[in-house]
Image (cartoon, rainbow, N blue to C red):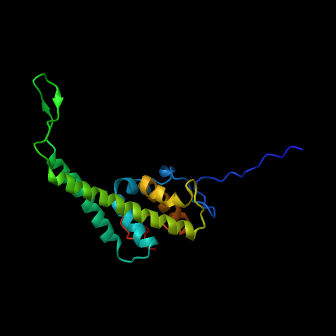
Amino acid sequence: MPKPPATSTAVPVGIAVPGQFRDGLFSCFNSPLILAAGCCCPFVTTGQLYERILAKKGTCLLVAAVIAVLMISTTVFDSQCSKPMELDAYGTLTVPEPEGVCVYKQVFALFSFAAFVIIGSITCMVREKVRAKYAIPPTCCGSLDDFCCGFFCPCLNQTQILRHLEVFEEGQYSITSPVGVEAV
């Protein structure tokens, strides 16, 4: 006798379901404010999640400042090592090779890497704690799920976590709050 097909029940997007994230990793546009904060100011959302989930009261500003300094200094000083484009004799736009090695470029590349590691590490730890708190199983990578999401797509991951917390902990997201939620 043939086995009947498995049935599934549709769950509307954005509805809190126990054992699952509120919505998918790529459902960023469900909350435009959180999307803007996560993509444009990842140092802020990293600090907010650090203070809110890892219970380090008063550390949001410190974490955000360290990451911001690392990211901004990389951008500013990297541009100092680059020469502007020039027109060659044929009217073609070229980028001249710098004379010698710009030591600052290597130093600030390390700053950029440090910011990447800090954001990725904090995002991994936060995701692990949120999944444990809400009994959310890993999706595709098993025990490496938090690592993959934390390092390969930290902005998407942070916005997913913030959207999830906004529903389950009933608070409106605020970019100016140290924990990402307006005080009631």
Q: Residue at x 59, y 63 (%)?
A: 136
Above or below: residue 117 compared with residue 83: below
Above or below: residue 101 compared with residue 48: above
Q: Is residue 6 left or right of residue 92?
A: right
In front of the other: 110 or 80: 110
In front of the other: 8 or 174: 8
Q: Is residue 170 left or right of residue 68?
A: right
State how many labels appear.
0
The image quadrant where one finds the N terminus is top right
Q: Is residue 109 visible?
A: yes
Q: Residue at x 55, y 65 (%)?
A: 131
Above or below: residue 3 compared with residue 178: above
* Whole-percent x, y for residue 95 in the image: 17, 35
Q: Is residue 174 visible?
A: no
* Whole-percent x, y for residue 180 in the image: 42, 67
Q: Is residue 96 left or right of residue 160?
A: left
Above or below: residue 109 compared with residue 58: above
The quarter holding residue 19 reads: bottom right
Name the residue at the top extreme: 90
Q: Residue at x 35, y 66 (%)?
A: 176
* Whole-percent x, y for residue 12 in the image: 63, 53
Q: Is residue 49 left or right of residue 9?
A: left
* Whole-percent x, y for residue 124 in the image: 45, 63
Name the residue at the right extreme: 1
